[in-house]
Amino acid sequence: MGRFNILFRFVFFAMLLAFQVACTQSESIVVPDNKIPDYKGVSTLRVENYVQRLFIDLLGREATDIERISFTNQLKSAELHDSCRLRLARVLMFDTTYHQGDSSYRHAFSQRVYDISKARFLEGASDPSIAQFIGNLNFAILVSRLNGDSVGVYRCLDARKKYFDILNSRFEFRKQLSDYRKMCAVMMNNTIYDDINMNSFNFVNAVFDNCLLRKPTKDEFSRSYAIIEKNTPSQIFNQVAGNKAEFCDAVTKSDAFHEAQIRWFYFVLIQRDASTAEVSALFHPFFQNHTIETIIENVVITDEYAQF
């Protein structure tokens, strides 16, 4: 009986020890297709191509030899790490140091965004043509004042202000006095945009297409048309708008506008639609700060954009 108890205790402790060892052993989990990027095989030429693509997309020009060599060396020294790519992208978008030909990278980037926006909304209307419209209005204001036409004076002053708003949007964006939403809003609230999209029906559809990348629903169109055609106050995108300026402001401050800009910049920079996950990842930070630089920097640091 004593031997049986000893044998039982021995077997019990052996099983307990085996159980404890099994519980403490780590299990190796293999995740398929989870390969760490190997950038050692990326040639200098491909890094230089990435640098040139950054300059062309963000500044609208190629890098000089000095810039290309400097940026390439920085990337190679950092082993093409995301943090280095992000730092260089931010230099091109925000640096205000003087550079011959550009004034500054920030100046060139702002001009690039301004030019893209004019192409998107105003069919690329040039600044000299906008200045000519302003000159014509100045003459019309003078004539109206001489004729005692106060209504005509007010109408011309309002039209002239809208043209100045277009020209000033580049400066305000560069100085970060206003964001991309304001630039888009003033691009739609002027007679150039009206002439391109004649009548209220086309105007409403164009705004939705340009800003939200879709057509309005039946209810959205009805409300929008009443605002534009009749100046009837209506609620649109959780705001009350009673005229064209307020309507453009409401559209560019909407959730839908922020989502559409993420999708639009993905398409512009890498020629494909953004996935739901990519939109979700960028929506909150973009909606919080309203700066398109947030979208751009997240796209241009990817291997897909860099083609590494």
Image (tube, rainbow, N blue to C red):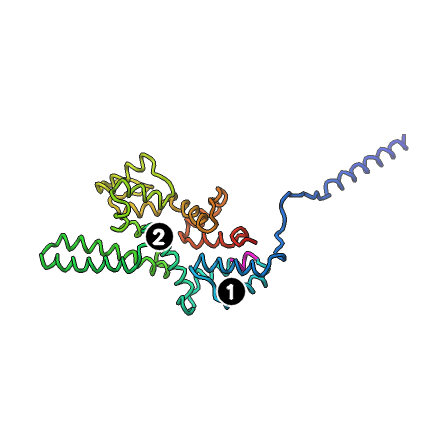
Circles 1 and 2: CB distance less than 8 Å?
no
Q: Which residues make up the magenta segment?
A: 81-85
Q: Vertically, is 12 above or below 257?
A: above
Residue 152, x across and y down, in percent: 14, 53
Dividing the picture into quadrants, the one containing residue 157 is: bottom left
Q: Residue at x 60, y 57 (%)?
A: 42
Residue 41, x across and y down, in percent: 63, 56
Q: Residues within 10 Å of mark 2 (few under 14, many from 20)?
A: few
Q: Residue at x 25, y 44 (%)?
A: 198
Q: Under tag 2, what secondary structure?
A: helix
Q: Is 110 included in the stretch rendered in magenta?
A: no
268 relative to 253 in the view: left or right: right
Residue 151, x across and y down, in percent: 13, 52
- The amino acid at mark 1 is Arg
Q: Which sits earlier in the primary sequence, circle 1 or circle 2?
A: 1
The residue to which callout 2 is attached is: 119
* Label of residue 79 in the image: none
44 relative to 56 in the view: left or right: right
Q: Residues within 10 Å of mark 1 (few under 14, many from 20)?
A: some
The residue to which callout 1 is attached is: 68
Q: Residue furthest left?
A: 147
Give the quadrant of the N terminus: top right
Residue 6, x across and y down, in percent: 87, 35
